[in-house]
Image: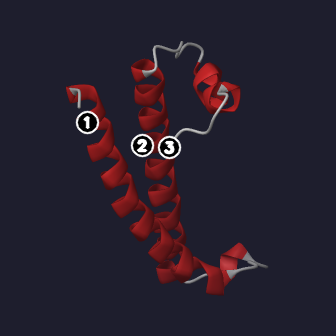
Amino acid sequence: MSENIQLIWKKIEHLRRMRGYLDYSLEQTLPLMPIGDWRQLTPAQHETLAAFRVRFSEFQEHLGKIMRAIAREEEQSTEPFSFVLVYPKNQEKPIS
């Protein structure tokens, strides 16, 4: 297994852990929904929403990095980034 593929697997494992944290934040956020009046939220509730936003943003960023690394491994163009996003759709068989 190449060094790049090993790095991709490490990133995927990290993404799995991040997903667990994101799931936890989502569970904490769901009871607040729907939010009718943002001014009535407590500081703790704002903190809960902020934690979800940060975890979602970090998850999204790491997912993009993994997708770019996979595209590079497959010798596909990574610029513009939209090429990375549609790359799996252009495959004849699913990536496993």
Residue tagged 2? 62
Residue 55 is situated, as x and y percent measured from the top left of the image, at 45, 59
Q: Earlier in the sequence, mark 3 or mark 1?
A: 1
Q: Are marks 2 and 1 in contact (CB under 8 Å)?
A: no
**Whether residue 7 is situated above or below residue 22 in the rendered picture:** above
Q: Earlier in the sequence, mark 2 or mark 3?
A: 2
Residue 78 is situated, as x and y percent measured from the top left of the image, at 52, 17
The three-letter code of the residue at mark 2 reads His
Q: How was the colour assigned to the protein in this rendering?
A: secondary structure
The front one of 3 and 27 is 3
Quadrant including the N terminus: top left
On residue 7, the disc is: 1
Image quadrant assignment for residue 87: top right
* Of marks 2 and 1, the one in the foreground: 1
Element under disc 1: helix
Q: Earlier in the sequence, mark 2 or mark 1?
A: 1
The three-letter code of the residue at mark 3 reads Ser
On residue 96, the disc is: 3
The front one of 50 and 40 is 50
**Whether residue 24 is situated above or below residue 57 in the rendered picture:** below
Residue 91 is situated, as x and y percent measured from the top left of the image, at 64, 27
The front one of 17 and 75 is 75
